[in-house]
Image (tube, rainbow, N blue to C red):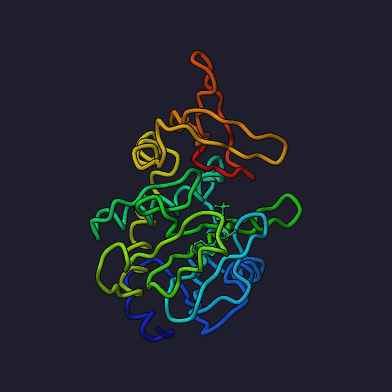
Amino acid sequence: MDERSLAASLAGLPIPSIHYFESIGSTNDYARTLAERAAPDGTLVIADEQTQGRGRLNRHWETRSGSALAFSLVIRPAPEEMANLGLFSALCGLAVCSTLRSRYGLDAQIKWPNDVLIHRKKTCGILVEAAWLGSQLQGIIAGIGINIAPSSVPSPGDLLFPATCVESELGRPVDRENLLAEILQVLTSQRTSLGSPEFIANWESWLAFKGEWVRVEQPERTLEGKLAGIARDGSLRLQIKDDEIIEIAVGDVRLRKAV
Ligand code: ADP
């Protein structure tokens, strides 16, 4: 993987510039500095290795050299997308999930709000952040990390949730640049339906643990209930009693299967 081969693989996609690094702290951090300097929509930061990759709540995300995809897109939302800013992370999850399903035949699912699982093991983590200057949005930073080769999967002792990689589930090698191009193609096309009923319906149809008993950990409380689906605005619908469904907004929430 290098800047030239990436440019060839991504030709034809709306990616105005590619910033490739053999090793970087975090692609999201670099993409943020670009967003702050008015980088255009679709600017791509990609690294073969991240040494300070981040998950939500500053948890560590591991990206080992030569084995994974780790990239961040600078998104400059159009005026009509501003009402759905909170759904860009779901868009990333949907794009990865739908690519793995349609192009690779994998039974990928989305652990709400946006982690992508294959056979209930985490294959992709997503971290979407916003760069604000006062009340002015400078851009959305959409970070996506995907485990491709077996060596990308951290040892179980380092994980809160079981993990896997695309090649182990598929049983054959995968070309990282092709997969990246496919995901960006799908993301570009699904972006046009951000927040539409069809977007929510797709998300719900690929939801992991649907109908199962789950635990939702929020900073101030932990709830258990049956995972009922996704509301129109992307909130999780959790049935906590026979006659009571509550909606949980996307935020600093962690979802687990209840044991
Ligand atoms: P959560 O599922 O808690 O929302 P995040 O998406 O924020 O998790 O990702 C951070 C967590 O992912 C870390 O706490 C770690 O357990 C796990 N993790 C780190 N690197 C990887 C990886 N390459 N593959 C799978 N899981 C990972």
Q: Residue at x 62, y 65 (%)?
A: 60
39 left or right of 144? right
Quadrant in the picture for residue 175: bottom left
The image shows residue 33 at horizontal and vertical percentages of 66, 70
Q: Is residue 79 above or below residue 3?
A: above
The image shows residue 170 at horizontal and vertical percentages of 27, 64
Q: Residue at x 38, y 63 (%)?
A: 184
Q: Residue furthest right?
A: 134
Which quadrant contains ligand 1? Answer: bottom right
13 left or right of 86? left
Q: Is residue 22 above or below residue 70?
A: below
The image shows residue 245 at horizontal and vertical percentages of 52, 21
Q: Quadrant of the N terminus?
A: bottom left
Quadrant in the picture for residue 61: bottom right
Q: Is residue 28 above or below residue 79?
A: below
The image shows residue 151 at horizontal and vertical percentages of 43, 75
Q: Residue at x 52, y 78 (%)?
A: 49
Q: Nearer the viewer, residue 39 or 253?
A: 253
